Amino acid sequence: MFRPDVKSKLLPLVLLWLAVHAVLLAALLGAKFLLTKSAILVLLLVGATIFVLTRIRAGQRKLTHGSVV
């Protein structure tokens, strides 16, 4: 089917092509999951901060009842 010299020249190119695609796939998937995890953590931190700050502010606004005559 192939001559041995053609096969020996194509094999390194095929391996290089596979290696480049493996690296690109790893980089894309790594970035996707890293950014997704970071976005979830940022949302949780912002939500927790808003919750804590509103609880602190609500605790400071206690109403005092005046004397009823």
Image (cartoon, rainbow, N blue to C red):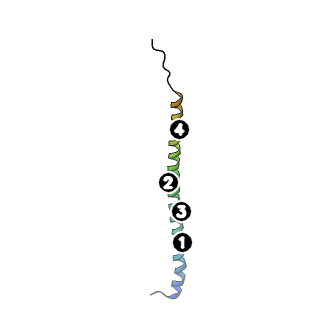
Which of labels 2 and 3 is toward the front?
2
Q: Indicate the position of residue 53 as horizontal and vertical percent values.
A: 53, 36
Q: Which residue is mark 1?
A: 19
- Local SS, label 4: helix
- Kindly report the distance in space between the C-alpha atoms of the residues bearing marks 4 and 3: 37 Å
Pointer 3 local density, CA inside 10 Å: few below 14, some 14–19, many at least 20: few
Return the disc, 4 or 1, that comes first in the chain's sequence: 1
Tell me which numbered mark, 3 or 1, is placed earlier along the sequence: 1
Helix, strand or loop at mark 2 = helix
The image quadrant that residue 19 belongs to is bottom right
Q: Which mark is residue 27?
A: 3
| Quarter of the view holding residue 56 | top right
C-alpha distance separating marks 1 and 2: 26 Å
Q: Earlier in the sequence, mark 2 or mark 4?
A: 2
The answer to whether 63 is drawn above or below residue 48 in the figure is above
Mark nearer the N terminus (4 vs 3): 3
Local crowd size for mark 4, using a 10 Å CA cut-off: few (<14), some (14–19), many (≥20): few
Q: Which residue is label 2 attached to?
A: 36
Per the image, label 3 sits on a secondary structure element best described as helix
Amino acid at the residue labelled 3: Ala
Look at mark 4 in the image and give the residue it sits on.
52
